[in-house]
């Protein structure tokens, strides 16, 4: 899987490093002082991840917790994300990571104690001035669960939220890798959210990710163990039969979990920054976006025209309600 | 026009002979025969930057730059004398990298261009993090090609494994052999592809006298046609004729060929952008009355802004009153609903 594994000198004896190296015996191991000596030092083309993917085992320095942009989650409460990894093994053709880092190589930040401390400090600071909830998201720069059996970090993050029931943690994923989570007792404030799209869209665009059915099976496993579940229908991509295809998907979802049980459903329409769009064009020139109704909007984002975006959000919300979602549980990711 | 770029005369000797290239009177390092040019830059990125830029200035018609030559390998498993088309080209101490233009037959090895010759294992170890092959020119060739907006390709023959101390002598001894091998490769794999002219499969309709395509209409038509082929169930010109109701358009005798072309282009964009068409239809319906009084109603062409421009030509008090009345009756609420996506799709 990994061509080379770069390990920061200080981490060579960490049990997490040892576990990783044990699993990837055939990868060449290179000891370095700091991952930044090599990672992003040169511009490594994104799709090179298909042939030569490297892994860096490193420590995250600087800001470990960051405020999330608006429209990130349910509104009214502050949202933060924490950084425990860069990059992803999947290849969604719309993924913004392809224009974000200068390398597709994976970085695992394994200084979990420092990261969890930063989360806890943020919670305490917030609770000194507010009695509202506070949200933390993993997976801003990676998929939260896809490699959790390697990073072995879920438990340490969940522990923080066991001590802080008024703070919420979201693991956002497209994977079906629930192994690590299944062994952990569920908490009402730790939510696993699955990004879902109709089966054919997953096939066309979420390259190398588990199918819709596999993701639904993962949802079922976690739900049966009592883990709270949320859903993201994002990115919504227009097709002539969009209503039918979302209905079909919702039928499958409610066979797995009634929408009344879903903590929240977020809806977002496909959109790109101009830079990411350029990257997508370079990496996936045959993808459907380039023959679609996307426009470059006055805010310099590439998206559908306003009436189309709003129609899509309205229509899919209507379908969610029809299939049993509570009105207050459906929120729209809008940057209007 | 192709430009072949070599660092050393030794690497180029078979090419000079086989392609019967003659020295160019304006530029001693440049050789030419018809549409093929060959440049000898001497070793190192600086030489390439200067000489290649100058050659491109002299011959702006050059379309493709092909860098051929020898390189070293940092990996002993790479066979000596094997020829590679590197995937990505890096440069020592430089962030920017380049990918070769074509995805065909690309190797999964990368190449790094260095400022000085890499002769020892110490020098080599830092480079191993980024690439397997090492040369002195490719990055500069790519950089100039990008600047001048030319396509470029790089082909390198592995002459040595970097730890071999005596490789300089061997390169000199083997120059003829390397040049023969590179030429052989070029002859079989590269030269032929340059003659594959872009096949512009002209469509019947573009020659049909019922239509007249101006230059810009032809461009728009070509783009829409390409997109329709990708997007929909249109696979060939027969499908196209059926889906776009070409026969109907042709039977519109009251229209001029140019107007029929506009209709065709309109139908094509409707087929390609069905949602936008519905929004536009709804807006046109809403504003039909306004437009009857010689007024112009313009909305954002991307349909992204909830606003419109209105222009009226008023030449009497009566017309003014008429326009004011009609504008007052115009339903902002309905306009707003359409722009908020409240339409039947
Ligand atoms: S799963 Fe998420 S992070 Fe991974 S490629 Fe897809 S969009 Fe990007």
Image (tube, grey):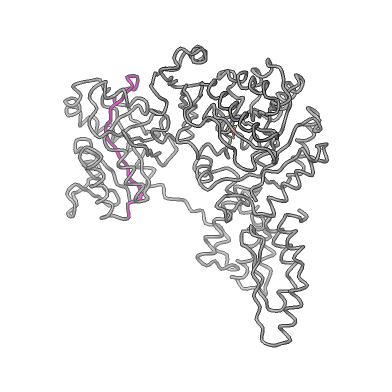
Dividing the image into four quarters, tell me where ligand 1 lies. top right
Mark yes or no: residue B13 visible: no
User: Residue B295 placed where, x, y %?
Assistant: 67, 76
At a point 64% along the width and 69% down the height, the residue shown is B309
Magenta segment boundaries in residue numbering: B61-80
Relative to B154, A220 lies left or right: right
At a point 31% along the width and 38% down the height, the residue shown is B138
Answer above or below: position of B299 versus B20: below
At a point 49% along the width and 30% down the height, the residue shown is A49
In the rendered picture of this protein, how many numbered marks are placed on residues?
0
Name, please, the residue furthest toward the front. Answer: A128
User: Residue B81 placed where, x, y %?
Assistant: 29, 26
Residue A93 lies in the magenta stretch: no
Answer above or below: position of B166 versus B333: above
Front-most of residues A114 and A149: A114
Residue B75 lies in the magenta stretch: yes
Mark yes or no: residue B212 visible: yes
């Amino acid at each position: 899987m990994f061509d080379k594994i770069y390990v920061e000198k200080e981490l060579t004896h960490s049990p997490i490093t040892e576990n990783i190296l044990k699993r990837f015996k055939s990868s060449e191991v290179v000891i370095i002082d700091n991952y930044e000596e090599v990672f992003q030092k040169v511009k490594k083309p994104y799709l090179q991840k298909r042939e030569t993917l490297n892994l860096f085992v490193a420590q995250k320095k600087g800001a470990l917790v960051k405020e999330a942009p608006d429209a990130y989650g349910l509104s009214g409460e502050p949202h933060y994300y924490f950084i425990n990894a860069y990059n992803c093994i999947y290849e969604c053709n719309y993924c913004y990571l392809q224009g974000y880092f200068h390398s597709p190589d994976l970085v695992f930040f394994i200084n979990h104690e420092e990261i969890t401390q930063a989360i806890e400090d943020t919670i305490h600071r917030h609770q000194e001035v507010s009695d509202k909830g506070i949200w933390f998201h993993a997976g801003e720069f990676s998929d939260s669960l896809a490699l959790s059996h390697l990073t072995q970090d879920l438990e340490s993050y969940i522990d923080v939220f066991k001590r802080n029931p008024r703070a919420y943690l979201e693991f956002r994923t497209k994977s079906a890798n629930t192994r690590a989570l299944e062994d952990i007792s569920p908490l009402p404030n730790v939510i696993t959210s699955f990004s879902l799209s109709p089966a054919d869209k997953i096939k066309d665009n979420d390259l190398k990710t588990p199918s819709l059915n596999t993701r639904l099976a993962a949802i079922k496993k976690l739900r049966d163990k009592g883990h709270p579940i949320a859903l993201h229908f994002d990115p919504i991509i227009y097709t002539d039969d969009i209503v039918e295809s979302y209905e079909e998907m919702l039928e499958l979802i409610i066979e797995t979990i009634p929408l009344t049980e879903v903590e929240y459903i977020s809806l977002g329409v496909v959109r790109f920054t101009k830079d990411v769009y350029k990257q997508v064009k370079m990496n996936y020139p045959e993808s459907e976006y380039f023959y679609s109704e996307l426009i470059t909007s006055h805010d310099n984002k590439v998206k559908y025209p306003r009436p189309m975006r709003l129609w899509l959000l309205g229509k899919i919300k209507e379908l969610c309600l029809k299939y049993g979602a509570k009105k207050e549980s459906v929120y729209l990711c809008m940057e209007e | 026009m192709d430009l072949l770029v070599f660092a050393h005369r030794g690497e180029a000797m078979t090419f000079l002979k086989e392609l019967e290239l003659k020295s160019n009177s304006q530029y001693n390092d440049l050789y030419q025969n018809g549409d093929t040019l060959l440049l000898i830059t001497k070793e190192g990125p600086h030489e390439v930057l200067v000489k290649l830029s100058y050659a491109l200035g002299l011959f702006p018609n050059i379309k493709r730059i092909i860098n051929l030559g020898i390189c070293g390998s940092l990996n002993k498993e790479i066979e000596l004398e094997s020829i590679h088309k590197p995937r990505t080209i890096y440069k020592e101490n430089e962030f920017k990298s380049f990918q070769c233009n074509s995805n065909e037959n690309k190797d999964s090895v990368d190449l790094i261009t260095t400022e000085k010759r890499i002769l020892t294992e110490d020098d080599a170890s830092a480079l191993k993090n980024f690439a397997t092959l090492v040369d002195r020119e490719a990055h500069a060739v790519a950089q100039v090609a990008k600047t001048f907006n030319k396509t470029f390709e790089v082909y390198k023959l592995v002459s040595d494994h970097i730890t071999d101390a005596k490789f300089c002598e061997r390169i000199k001894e083997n120059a003829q052999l390397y040049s023969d091998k590179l030429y052989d490769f070029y002859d079989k794999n590269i030269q032929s592809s340059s003659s594959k002219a872009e096949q512009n499969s002209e469509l019947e309709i573009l020659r049909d006298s019922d239509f007249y395509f101006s230059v810009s209409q032809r461009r728009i038509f070509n783009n829409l046609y390409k997109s329709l082929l990708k997007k929909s169930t249109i696979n060939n010109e027969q499908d196209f004729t059926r889906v776009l109701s070409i026969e109907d358009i042709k039977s519109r005798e009251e229209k001029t060929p140019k107007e029929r072309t506009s209709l065709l282009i309109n139908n094509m964009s409707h087929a390609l952008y069905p949602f936008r068409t519905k929004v536009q239809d709804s807006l046109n319906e809403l504003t039909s009355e306004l437009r009857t009084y010689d007024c112009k109603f313009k909305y954002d062409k991307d349909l992204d802004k909830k606003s419109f421009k209105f222009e009226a030509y008023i030449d009497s008090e009566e017309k003014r009153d008429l326009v004011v009345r009609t504008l007052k009756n115009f339903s902002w609420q309905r306009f707003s609903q359409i722009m908020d996506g409240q339409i039947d799709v």
